[in-house]
Image (tube, grey):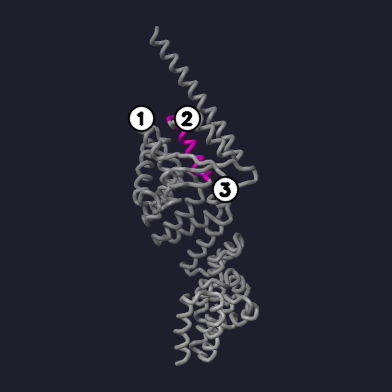
Amino acid sequence: MRKVLLVILLLISSKAFTQSTNAILKTSDQLVSQKKYKTAFDVLNKADPKNRNPDIVIAKEDIVLAYFVTSIMHKMFSLMDLKSNEDIMDYRGKAGSSQLYVLPVDSVLNELIKTDHDNYKLYKALGNYYYEVFLHYNAHWTETPETLFKRIEDNYAKVIELQKADYMVYYELGYINEVQEKYGPAANYFLKSIELNSHCANAYYNLAYAELYQNNRSEALKNAIKSIDLYEDKTYKADAARMTGEIYSELNDTKNELYYYELSNSIDPKNYYTLKSLLDVYVKTQSPKEKNALNTFYSLGPENPTIYNDLSKIYFNKPKELSEFYESKLPGYIDHKKVYGSLNFYLAQLYLSTDKVKAKECLLKAKITLATVLPQDNPVFSAIETLLKQASN
């Protein structure tokens, strides 16, 4: 009779414990939905200060990984409560007032696994922790990326063994294989992720990338287009459209290449990489849209040498058109010394093979102008001297 009573009491106690944990987790979830991240963590910490309850520990991990203001090697995290109209990215990595908490997630989870070694949630949480560490720290953590990859794979392998893997487990396995340039295994993991969730835009996008590196352009194209349809974030959607344009470029399908570059630009206007590709196509096809695209592209960074270097590549066979463009820009930047000097410097390079007198004139202007805004040891001055010698021969 006593044994029966003891079993009943244990069952009642276990049920009460479960109800108590569920209530705590529900309260924490409600606070998170209100952006009260610090308060939510405090509720969990008060309920389980020694980190012995797996479900509460995992809830703590979810909060610190998703909503930290500052992370110190993903061992210590600072948290704060936000207002409803605020976003954590407005504060992340910036000076301000936030509460610091110590939570060595991997140590805590590994300790719990010792006594609860068939709890798939712990392995999944640990795999996700190492994945997040890789995303945020890569080679700058306490362990190498290769070690992190091994830890991710080992923990997710256990989740798969316990038949509890969801689409994110397979997606993250795909991603770390792709990072390691293991495109075949990566593609297989992404396919499994899509099988479990056919609406995972990231899986389609990264599958397209993996297929592209295996020269499976038709499959890459299909999956890239699917990711465009699924993405809601405009930056990701535009990036997927640009990738699609790049694939069509490799297939020498200029019509569709142009369509998807223009689509990308319409979704996320003035993206440097999209505009560069779009301008390149306009130049090659002699499009009437070229001049407007050239002006827009140049205006993204007239002080940036990369702009000029990219334009030199795009207009490699049309130097006269580029020199005329730079000449047209000179009057508008005469008071902007760095841009004015840069225009003269790159004009000189264009003139060097056709008009050395003009090239020398531009180089001297560049030298005088840039000397007012750049330090004397800037490499551009040695480049100017080299070009001056060429212009004098």
Mark 2 lies on a secondary structure that is loop
Indicate which label's residue lies in the foreground, 2 or 1: 2
Residues at circles 1 and 3 in contact by the CB criterion of under 8 Å: no
- Out of 49 and 110, give the one closest to the viewer: 49
Report the mark closest to the observer, 2 or 3: 3
Q: Of helix, strand and loop, which one carries label 3?
A: loop
Q: Which residue is mark 2?
A: 48
- Residue drawn at (48%, 88%) of the image: 353
Query: What kind of element bears circle 1?
Result: helix
Q: Position of residue 105 (x, y in %)?
A: 42, 39
| Neighbours of disc 1 within 10 Å: few (<14), some (14-19), many (20+) | few
- Please identify the dominant SS of the magenta region: helix
C-beta proximity under 8 Å, tags 2 and 1 = no
Alpha carbon distance from label 2 to label 1 = 17 Å
Quarter residue 31 falls in: top right
Q: Which mark is residue 94?
A: none
Q: Position of residue 41 (x, y in %)?
A: 53, 36
The amino acid type, in three-letter code, at marker 1 is Thr
Question: What segment carries the magenta color?
Answer: 52-68
* Residue designated by label 3: 96
- The amino acid at mark 3 is Gly
Report the disc number at residue 115. 1
Residue depicted at 56% across the width and 77% down the height:
372
As rendered, which of 190 and 119 lies closer to the eye?
119
Question: Dot 2: within a 10 Å radius of its alpha carbon, few (fewer than 14), some, or many (20 or more) residues?
Answer: some
